[in-house]
Image (spheres, grey):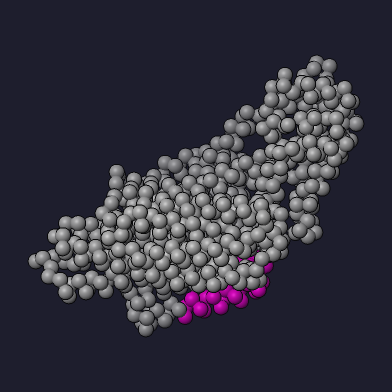
Amino acid sequence: MQERQKGLGLILVALMLGMLLAALDQTIVSTALPTIVSDLGGLEQLSWVVTGYLLASTVSTPLWGKLGDQYGRKSLFIAAIVVFLIGSALCGLSQSMGQLIAFRSLQGLGGGGLMVLAQAIVGDVVPPRERGKYQGFFGAVFAVSSIVGPLLGGFFVDNLSWHWVFYINLPIAAVALIVIVAVLPGRSTRTHHTIDYAGMALLGSATSCLVLLATWGGTVYPWSDPMIWGLGLAALAMLVGWWFVARAADEPVMPLRLFALRSFTMSSLVGFVVGFGMLGALTYLPLFIQVVYGVSATLSGVHLLPMMAGMLTMSIVSGQVVSRTGRYRFFPILGTAVATLGMFLLSRLTEHSSTLTMSIDLLVLGAGLGMVMQVLVIVVQNAVGYEDLGVATSGAIFFRSIGGSFGVAVLGAVFTGRLNDDLRAVVATVRLPAGFDPARVQEDPTVIRKLPPALGAEFLHVYADAISRVFAVAAPIMFVAFVLSWFIPEQPLRKTVKAVDLGEGLGATSAERSSLAEVERGLVRLADSDLRKDYYARLGALAGLDNVPPAGVWIIARLGGEGWVGAQELADRGRVTRAEGRPYAEQLIEAGLLTRSTDGESLRLTAYGEHMAETLLAHARQGLKELIDDWGPHPELQHLLDRLCPELLGAEVDRPS
């Protein structure tokens, strides 16, 4: 048993390392971007360093998930690690912004697989009775990455070089790869899928065209340019093509019937805007902090902590309140209002604003975003039927991720356009030193600190004005989300939906879980919480075992249908010593429920004991059934109860009491 636990522990560490890498790479580059721009140039392309990764990881996620179901997750997870490793190495070796963007997209392709397959493999290797506690660890990975990402990015830039933002992935991913190859068992069962390759390609391509249009329109090309019109027409044609493909596909990547549900449509739109604001802020704030305030990359990450702390705190608080009250509509409305206020406050930042002022503004924005992100997933899960639960959950997170891609692109275009206008105004009105090329200020913002104070102040104002314009544009867009959130209807909350997942509130990409896996996740979380209370006392009372203590009820449940079980093994399962467990066993023997082998080393239930174990199982199954009754009758759910109940009933708890 200890060997099994050790092997399981190694697998889980490797899976969490893989997920940590994928989650970190959504945020770690933010504080390194100013230095990357100084080294490689291409400020106007800065947004694509983030957008390329997000688009590739988001669009590829459904494909990784379905291929893993169909061909086995171990080989696919290994492939995802290898792709991520190659992408990371090439990112670190990049010599131009174009190379970096291309390799970031490759890295994102592997990152999407790491995220979805790590979560799926947990269901393969962790018994249901242990899964509840481990699910919390994986949610914590997203929390850690959201806080640590900007700090790590700044630390590497200040103490090594920006290349190490990507090189750090290599040893970590290599460890995960070695452990997975050596320890993770292959899975013999396969789930056949009719994979919607055409739908994925059309939806991904249409999204890419729209992001390019938003990035280039009015900056690289005039809005009337044939390139912009061509991108718009191509996106429209591919969306129409996707609509036809989705109507005919057996398993469409995004079923059209979901958009007939007001809860799904409104939540997706609000989530799109929330992702827009969150990633847009994270991408351009470090540039403002490092250039205007003149702080190091590491300190710029520290300056972002109020925003991340606000997001994390309110994500946890909103999830807990929704779980306990069953009411959720209040949070998107309040959250988008607070986030709009945060955007407005940030739009008033100048080069003279204090650090305290900026920290308060960021805390307000983070608190607003935290109140919305997780709750939107709950809204969607609660609104759809069982058959669409998995794809609707993935869809909600998909739209938030795509919103982030658009946010970085659109706000990047706003930033670049305003910066260019202000630079031209400075050049036209201020006498520049002989031989000084004002374009250098855009290519390498650090040169501002080397200019005469009066001239340097002019260019600092240029950067401060450009970043304030970003938030001045983002604030009314966030206000649109506030208006849309009023149209989200409130419905009675399903019981399994109350078991919220912290990871879904902190920037996770689409989990691409099946509907059955979604219900199982919630059911295991609820059961795990119940098992750590007075579950066995209540269950014993229902079965008529009033005189049997909870520890004795646990022994009966654990031994049901098992035959002879070693006394030491049973003690290990209960996490007690044999001396501590012996009084409970003796009481069951006296009651005729249990018998001991002649050598005293093994135990088994009597016929009466087996009958009571079946009675306990029936009551436990009925209790679980009540938790999923609000999904309606489905054969899959009945099979789920038959599979989960025996394992959960004999759960390995800290100590029955």
Q: Residue at 83% of width from left, 30% of height from top?
A: 548
Q: Position of residue 268 (x, y in %)?
A: 57, 67
Comparing 229 with 410, the one in front is 410
Q: Farthest left residue?
A: 434
Compared across the picture, whether 603 is left or right of 325 comes to right
Compared across the picture, whether 240 is left or right of 530 comes to left
Q: How many marks?
A: 0
Q: In this orientation, does residue 112 appear? A: no
Whether 508 is drawn above or below 575: the answer is below
Q: Residue at 20% of width from left, 60% of height from top?
A: 448
Q: Residue at 62% of width from left, 41% of height from top?
A: 133
Quadrant of res 447: bottom left
Q: Position of residue 157 (x, y in %)?
A: 31, 48
Q: Position of residue 11 (x, y in %)?
A: 56, 39
Comparing 64 with 134, the one in front is 134
Q: Residue at 43% of width from left, 77% of height from top?
A: 231
Compared across the picture, whether 214 is left or right of 314 comes to left
Q: Does the magenta segment cover residue 96? A: no
Whether 72 is drawn above or below 609: the answer is below
Q: Position of residue 574 (x, y in %)?
A: 71, 29
Compared across the picture, whether 330 is left or right of 51 comes to right
Whether 45 is drawn above or below 158: the answer is below
Comparing 176 with 627, the one in front is 627
Q: In this orientation, does residue 590 appear? A: yes
Quadrant of res 635: bottom right
Q: In the rendered image, which quarter contains the N terminus?
A: top right
Q: In the rendered image, which quarter contains the C terminus?
A: top right
Judged by its main secondary structure, the magenta piece is helix
> What residue range appears in magenta?
233-260
Whether 559 is drawn above or below 251: the answer is above
Q: Does the magenta segment cover residue 259? A: yes
